[in-house]
Image (tube, helix red, strand yellow):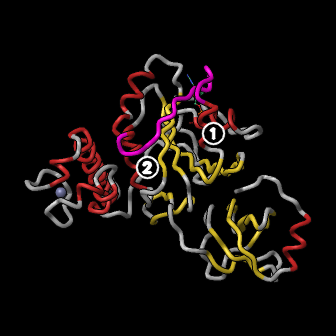
Amino acid sequence: MYPACQPRTRVAIIAAMSDSTGVVVEVHGMLATVLVDGARVRCRPPRDRTTPVIGDRVTVDHGEDPPRITSIGPRERTYQRLSVSGPTPVATHIERLVIVTSAFPGPRLGLIDRMWIALDDPAVQVVLVLNKCELPSAADSVKDLDDFVALGAEVIQTSTKAPLGLELLGERLSHGLSVLAGHSGVGKSSLLNALVPGARVKVGDVHDPTGKGRHTTTVATVHPYRDGLLVDTPGVRAFALDGLSLEGLAERFPGFREPSERCHFAGCLHDGEEGCAVVDEAPPERVQRWLALLASVREERVAARAPADKPARRPR
Ligand code: GDP
Ligand code: ZN
């Protein structure tokens, strides 16, 4: 679907055509690389200044030099970041969201909940990679992911050290567009290096003496892989859910979509009202996790609204 080969001669043939359609496979600064009929064509963004996103289906006008994207098709199955500056799509028309977690110190379930919420389409397959599975904590950690399996996620146990599960993971990622996300330190870069020859993603150290974390960029890196594309997003320590109302969060919380249709209250936050179908029907651990997420999002929002530290009082 996204061949890595790039027969340059085709560019000339394409240039002779006026308009053609293609898929955005890379975005760098103001330019986007569009795969048109097997050739990689560097294009300018549309005149309306919409920023193209990886996976966008676009029309390209070859009459300009460099060619220009003239239209972007409707986005669906989009993975986005939800930051204070608004939702920022990372990739669209994605086949799967691959959330990498690790058997030690164990998967961060709250982070999985948040990344799941950031997906705007329940049709996207969620793959949970549990890395570092050569460690003895693997058995307990895999159980922690059971409720996501009940919601349709697939769990793949891997280890880059053993090695373990790499073939199966490679098979899953072999076609379509996969977005890789995860907490920093889980081994996402190591997995990419193991799968993609020449990826050379820098492997970090989990020990962080400064406590401030590595400096990360927000740019996604794309690796062609077999017939697919891997979109690697920077490892995170926290995942913001700004720009969504609390009701919106409740709607998207993993496992809540279906029971919330039977909840008697419009805009219910499923936080204990009698007659709330979510509280009655969803597994109690899920409800607990929802309440924890709700509390932390409320705290984050209060903190964000708080005025900057008052200037220290000075003696007259
Ligand atoms: P990233 O931040 O998610 O990209 O993680 P890295 O790939 O940079 O790896 C973080 C640390 O985990 C490094 O010290 C790796 O050597 C280590 N690591 C990666 N994969 C494994 C694994 O399968 N088992 C164990 N025990 N450690 C791993
Ligand atoms: Zn409710």
User: Which residue shows up at 46% across the image and 42% down it?
Assistant: 237
Quadrant of the rendered image containing residue 44: bottom right
Amino acid marked by disc 2: Met
Q: Secondary structure at mark 2?
A: helix
Residue 314 visible in the current orientation: no
Can you give x and y, in whole percent of width and height, for residue 293 in the image? 29, 47
Q: Quadrant of residue 248?
A: bottom left
Q: Is residue 45 above or below residue 138?
A: below
Residue 117 locus on image (x, y percent): 39, 54
Q: Quadrant of ligand 1?
A: top right
Return the mark for residue 171. 1
For marks 2 and 1, the one nearer the N-term is: 2
Q: CA distance from mark 2 to mark 1?
A: 23 Å
Give the crowd class for mark 1: few <14, some 14-19, many >=20 residues within 10 Å. Answer: few
284 inside magenta stretch: no
Residues shaded magenta = 150-165
Residue 160 sits in which quadrant? Answer: top right
Which residue has dot 2 on it?
115
- For badge 1, the amino acid type reads Glu
In the image: residue 85, left or right of residue 261 = right
Task: Name the secondary structure under disc 1.
Answer: helix
Q: Residue at 20% x, 57% y: name it.
A: 269
Give the total number of marks visible in the rendering. Answer: 2
Q: Nearer the viewer, residue 24 or 221?
A: 24
Determine whether 148 is above or below 220 in the image.
above
